């Protein structure tokens, strides 16, 4: 016989698989209402920025990404981004290309892809 308690237990197991505690989806739920609204506005702004700017004058895709790397486009406030994605790595002038790549890969593996 299926009970409400067993259904709740099964649901909890499914949620843990679909939305693990360390996932961005789970971390989004920890934001307060104002920060979540700001995050949603950032996502909307980023989507609009990409839609407006992704194709360059020569018809090539990827322009929006290049613009973001140059400092254009919407920015997620640090008070929101840091709890979601962690501390971004610091690349210093004396770091080799390999050191910089290693720092970013560690960041991506720890903060984004796990």
Image (tube, rainbow, N blue to C red):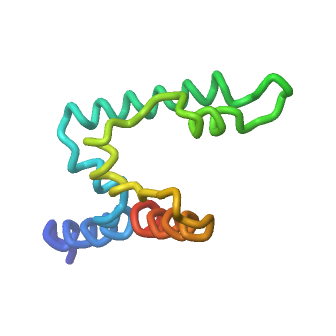
The x, y position of residue 7, in whole percent, is 22, 68
For the N terminus, the image quarter is bottom left
Residue occupying image coordinates x 53% and y 67%: 105
113 in relation to 93, above or below: below
Number of marks present in the image shown: 0
Q: Which image quadrant is residue 77 in?
A: top left
For the C terminus, the image quarter is bottom left
- Which residue is more in the foreground, 87 or 13? 87
Judged from this view, the residue extending furthest toward the front is 94
The x, y position of residue 17, in whole percent, is 37, 70
> Left or right: where does residue 60 sit relative to residue 18?
right
> Left or right: where does residue 58 sit relative to residue 37?
right
Judged from this view, the residue extending furthest toward the right is 58
The x, y position of residue 79, in whole percent, is 25, 42
Residue occupying image coordinates x 55% and y 69%: 99
> Left or right: where does residue 101 sit relative to residue 25?
right
2 in relation to 93, above or below: below
The x, y position of residue 86, in whole percent, is 33, 57
Residue occupying image coordinates x 66% and y 25%: 53
Residue occupying image coordinates x 47% and y 70%: 106
22 in relation to 61, above or below: below
């Amino acid at each position: 016989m299926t009970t409400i308690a067993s259904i709740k237990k099964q649901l909890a197991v499914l949620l843990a698989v679909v939305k693990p505690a360390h996932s961005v989806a789970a971390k989004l739920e920890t934001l307060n209402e104002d920060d979540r609204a700001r995050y949603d506005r950032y996502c909307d702004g980023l989507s609009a920025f990409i839609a407006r700017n992704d194709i360059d004058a020569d018809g090539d895709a990827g322009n929006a990404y290049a613009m973001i790397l140059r400092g254009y486009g919407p920015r997620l406030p640090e008070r929101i981004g840091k709890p979601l994605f962690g501390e971004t790595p610091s690349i210093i002038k004396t770091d080799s290309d390999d050191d910089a790549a290693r720092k970013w890969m560690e960041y991506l593996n720890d903060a984004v892809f796990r």
